[in-house]
Amino acid sequence: MPEPALAAAVRRSPALRASARYLAVVLAALAVFAAVLLLAGKDPLRAYADTFRDTLADAYGFSELLVRMTPLLLAAVAVALPARLGLINVGGEGQLYMGAWLASAGALLFPRWPAWLLLPLVAMLGFAGGALWAAIPGVLRGLRLVNETIATLLLNYVAPLVVSYSIFGPWRSAESSAYPQSPAFADAARLPSFLDTRIHAGLLVSLAALLFYWLLLEKTRWGVQMRAIGGNPEAAQRLGIPVAVWIVVALAMGGGMAGLAGMGEVMGIHGRLRQGLSPGYGFTGFLIAWLAGGRAMGILLMAFLFAMITSAGDTLQITQGVPYAVVNILLAVILFIVLARRRGWAR
Amino acid sequence: MTTPLLVGILAGAILSGTSLLYAALGETIGERAGIVNLGLEGILLIGASVGFAVTAATGSAWWGLPAAAAAGAASNLLFGWLVVARRANQLASGLAMMFLGFGVSALVGARWVGAVIVGLPKWRPPLLGTLPWVKSSTLFHYDVLTWLALPVALLLWWVLFRTRWGLRVRAVGESPTATYAAGIDPSALQYQALAAGGALGGVAGAHLSLSLTLTWAEYMTAGRGFIAIALVIFSKWDPLRAVAGALLFGGAEALQLQLQARGVEISPFLLEMSPYVLTLVVLLAWGGSRRLAAPASLGRTFQGVQ
């Protein structure tokens, strides 16, 4: 019996095969989550239809998807880049906060600078904040003192406290006593946004970072060196690759990406430094990078999917009266299904 | 000044150290068996929410507490199924558990927002109550979980280091292959360790909702699961050192509250950082020579033996 054309095409093309696999996982997870919603006495079909209406079928909703994707892409690259050396960066959350913090420092210190000068400065400071924060575990690991997984994890919880310290203390805005935050940044420090949406120039930064990541790994000698270290650090060392330096550089570059995400949130969205800048973007970025197997295209797709899921959380809260956090179950189910597949995923 | 500063800090350290200690002990069992669960925060949340919901529904914390322990054990077994049976990546699986905990606890707790429960009864030995500055503080006025925290830590130390089962668990954490070669099934031990550890994690969460807050609030653990993971490292995977660590980390929190109450102008955030910074400093102090500290196979996936 001749194979149906679609099935044959899917079988022949690796890209189509991967897409079909992603689709199957998402559908299965949606089915499980629907069961959970049913048990909670909600209407899953309406919830899904509402989510679709609010995101893909609505111009503003779609723009919000892109807004959410912006930090997720950067947070994923922050994990994927050092991962090529076999380094596990679970500190994206802290690096994001430090990027936001240092970028805010720049914006508050030089409020009179013109935009053409201030914006690049703020972006560089955002990168530097995350990079320096990630360089701490990098140096510790490079010197073989502390495992980078533990160090990046621990520093996650210090960074938001640095932000809190600043906005409760020296940077506290005089105008709002109830809600601690920094004064509003000068307009020159704000990332320009597109039309009437909240999409800001940070999205271009994210896409550029993803492109940079792809070019670095696939098209340069450095990418080859990084993969050599990831494959066998001892052999790489003997070949004359400075492994310890690469460890610091790769973690710092990753941290810088997460720092840019933080910079984008404060300069593109909030316009001030605040607490709770990130609802776990750093951790979500880890999962995106991991699900994507470090591939640039996969990161793009997964970031879109995760942005969609968080939007679904908003819809659930508004139309079904379910707490926003419940959508984390859907996220967890997707991960469980992927994790439970034997023989690795996407590698 | 009604209570001396030190008494206030000690009382607070014991109160907030209790849940930290149970959580850290639970994580210690799993990590001794070679499995790191970064999703401890999620286990705590599930314990806190299930414990609260059952207590609110039945009217008795004596139903809520075992329910929280069972929910914690079940969650950790689900995690175990992923990392042991399916050989999934432990870090990613842990983060998945964290997200599951966020979601499940929000769903379980949603119905009980605003409810107030009668928590675990508190009791102070009559003799201790007569001490002068004890009466006016919460010192020695504890629920059963706080009173049992030290005995449980001692018991766990004894089980891990003085019993055959404990030896086997530690052996799995060092080398599953060698354990397998000795005719012991590593996965069975890992499941047992995770079930016990999950139950302790559930109890840790329950202590928050059934004894400290007596109401449900979303994300009420506020990072305690991660402090507990830091505590496990800080205490070098040793239940007895974890007691001291829990008092120290709990003390940092208590000191912060005491200073605030006394109007001392110091940023609470510097104190809040201390558990993480201290743990990092301890790791640094060991340097590269982490001699016999971490279980050798921690975080690695046992791929089986051909």
Image (cartoon, helix red, strand yellow):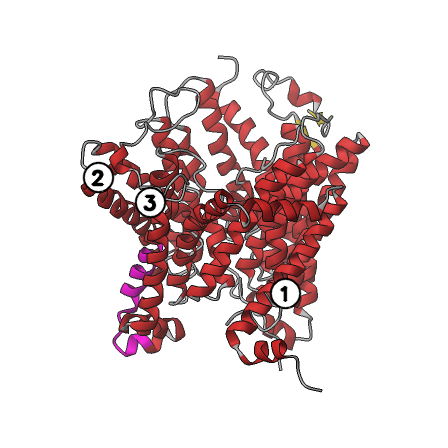
Three-letter code for the amino acid on which mark 2 is drawn: Ala
User: In the visual, does B196 lie left or right of B250?
Assistant: right
Confirm whether residue B203 shows in the render.
no
Q: CA distance from mark 1 to mark 2?
A: 47 Å
Tell me the distance, in whole angstroms, between the alpha carbons under discs 1 and 3. Answer: 37 Å
Residue that numbered label 2 is attached to: A115
Name the residue nearer the viewer: A178 or B46.
A178
Query: For the view shown, which residue lies furthest in the top direction?
Result: B1
Disc 3 marks which amino acid? Gly
Numbered range of the magenta stretch: A236-254
Crowding around mark 3 (Cα neighbors within 10 Å: few <14, some 14 to 19, many 20+) is many
Q: Secondary structure at mark 1?
A: helix
Q: Residue shown at 44%/65% (left/top)?
A: A297
**Residue B227: image x %, image y %?**
51, 43
Task: Name above or below for residue B251 compared with residue B136.
Answer: below
How far apart are labels 2 and 3 at the CA level? 19 Å
Q: Position of residue B290 (x, y in %)?
A: 43, 59
Q: Can residue B99 be spotted in the picture?
A: yes
Q: Does residue A202 lie above or below B86 as drawn?
A: above
Q: How far across and how far down the image is residue B178, in percent?
A: 60, 74
- Chain letter belonging to callout 1: A
Q: Residue A83 lies in what quarter of the image?
A: bottom left
The amino acid pointed to by label 1 is Ala
In reply to whether residue A245 is colored magenta, the answer given is: yes
Labels 1 and 2 touching (C-beta < 8 A): no
Residue where numbered disc 1 is placed: A24
Is residue B89 a member of the stretch shown in magenta? no
Residue for badge 3: A99
**The numbered mark 2 sits on a residue in which chain?**
A
The residue located at (48%, 42%) in the rendering is: A60
Look at the magenta stretch and give its main secondary structure.
helix
